[in-house]
């Protein structure tokens, strides 16, 4: 097999418009915007829709057919206006090095952080207003932004853009993609299995291709594996996702483990941390797995200190592919994965914090001081509530404390 180390989603990435399936209306609208740029009001286009529907692929395919050079940047990597101006702004003014037409692709524009983006959205809006080249942005919004509430931070970039919807792909479109790949890869798999795999993808071609590659690489009989599939849940349970980490030594399979889980990266980290010792029995495997986890934790700290969110992908690879290849072999033990104990500890801590904050707020309101100052005085209130029940009762009545808040002060 050629290009064995290249993921199939990249290996079979569409190179021409004719290779993009199931998005005829969107392709026509995007092609029209790019080819007629400068002759209309729109200075940018926003491609929105679920993942795996061909948004990024469409940009590259149309650019190739029209002879445009593509400069791609990921919005999640930018945290402020300076970075936007330095990269996207400069690119929007400078001609292509090769003398070709150029378009700028800002992928995952909805990944720019809200209150922490330090003017990134406003800077991008200004770049759009002044650009000499078409700007195309992709976003994971699943519904029409005209009909649903957009975060107000996106209003400025929406004004100067044409909105193009990419809907979920039909099962037949995904089937055609899988059929083409299976023939080129020489995979012996039935049409029925390919159609089941296509249905199982819920309109996400990328997920379907990843699934096909997973079964082809990890099984001598893809039909048998595919036949055992249930319908894909839009949000996969964390315990099921962990199977892809712990029950394989193939980094490609493990790397996609958290693609369809709802938990945020911190929760993913806790799940992996909790279940490593439940899966890995060999001391060397344990050592290597925890070493990989500790390195991922270093990058978590760097995100916190530097606000460089591009490290999130590094962390995800470490706690999936890194943990998977930390072991020398697959274990035969049952996949009995448990929710992290630290979640309960975090919940208890948060509950205590919420009560403390609520009491401090009521105290500050009655005494006309700041909540910070009131918080510093709470230890004295706790002493009163433990030593002087009569005085505690008067304070509780004055501050209008509920039973749980009184109990917190008494403890």
Image (cartoon, rainbow, N blue to C red):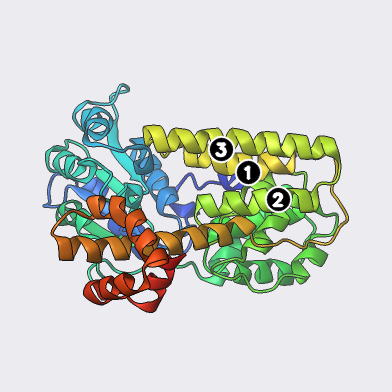
Mark 2 vs mark 3: in front:
3
Name of the residue lying farthest toward the top: 97
Dot 3 crowding, Cα within 10 Å, few <14, some 14–19, many 20+:
some
Q: How far apart are marks 3 and 1 (CA)?
A: 10 Å
Q: In the rendered image, which residue does mark 2 sit on?
A: 245
- Find numbered disc 2 in the image and state the secondary structure of the residue it sits on: helix
For the residues bearing labels 2 and 1, Cβ distance under 8 angstroms:
yes
Task: Give coordinates of residue 197: x percent, y percent.
Answer: 66, 67
Mark 2 or mark 1: whose residue is earlier in sequence? 2
Check disc 1 and report the residue beneath it: 319
| Residue at 72 percent of width and 70 percent of height | 229
Sequence order check, earlier mark of 3 and 1: 3
Residue 295, how many percent across, how many down? 60, 33
**Residue at point 47%, 55% (across, down):** 20
Q: Is residue 359 visible?
A: yes
Q: Can residue 147 be seen in this view?
A: no
Q: How much space separates mark 2 and mark 3, taking CA atoms?
A: 18 Å
* Dot label at residue 297: 3
């Amino acid at each position: 097999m050629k290009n064995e180390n290249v993921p199939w989603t990249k290996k079979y990435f569409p190179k021409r418009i004719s290779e993009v399936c199931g998005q005829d209306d969107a392709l026509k609208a995007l092609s029209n915007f790019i080819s007629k740029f400068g002759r209309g009001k729109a200075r940018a286009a926003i491609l929105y829709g679920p993942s795996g529907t061909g948004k990024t692929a469409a940009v590259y395919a149309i650019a190739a057919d029209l002879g445009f050079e593509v400069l791609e940047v990921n919005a999640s990597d930018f945290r402020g206006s300076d970075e936007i101006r330095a990269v996207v702004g400069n690119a929007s003014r400078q001609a292509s090095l090769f003398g070709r037409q150029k378009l700028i692709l800002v992928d995952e524009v909805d990944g720019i952080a809200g209150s922490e983006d330090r003017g990134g959205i406003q800077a991008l809006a200004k770049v759009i207003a002044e650009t000499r080249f078409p700007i195309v942005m992709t976003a994971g919004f699943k519904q029409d932004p005209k009909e649903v509430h957009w975060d107000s931070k996106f209003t400025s970039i929406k004004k100067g853009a044409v909105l193009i919807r990419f809907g979920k792909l039909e099962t037949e479109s995904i089937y055609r993609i899988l059929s083409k790949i299976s023939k080129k890869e020489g995979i012996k798999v039935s049409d029925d299995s390919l159609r089941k795999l296509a249905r199982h993808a819920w309109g996400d071609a990328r997920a379907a291709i990843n699934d096909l590659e997973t079964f082809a690489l990890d099984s001598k009989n893809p039909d048998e594996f595919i036949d055992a599939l249930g319908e894909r849940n839009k949000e996969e349970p964390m315990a099921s996702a962990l199977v892809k980490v712990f029950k394989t030594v193939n980094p490609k399979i493990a790397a996609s483990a958290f693609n369809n889980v709802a938990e945020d990266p911190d929760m993913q980290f806790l799940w992996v941390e909790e279940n490593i010792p439940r899966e890995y029995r060999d001391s060397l495997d344990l050592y290597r797995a925890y070493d990989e986890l500790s390195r991922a934790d270093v990058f978590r700290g760097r995100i916190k200190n530097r606000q460089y969110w591009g490290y999130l992908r590094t962390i995800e690879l470490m706690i999936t592919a890194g943990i998977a290849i930390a072991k020398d072999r697959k274990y035969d033990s049952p996949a009995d994965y448990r929710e992290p104990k630290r979640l309960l500890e975090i919940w208890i801590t948060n509950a205590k914090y919420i009560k403390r904050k609520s009491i401090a707020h009521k105290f500050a309101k009655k005494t006309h001081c700041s909540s910070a100052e009131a918080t510093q005085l709470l230890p004295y209130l706790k002493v009163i509530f433990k030593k002087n029940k009569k005085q505690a009762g008067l304070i509780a009545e004055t501050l209008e404390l509920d039973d749980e808040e009184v109990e917190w002060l008494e403890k």
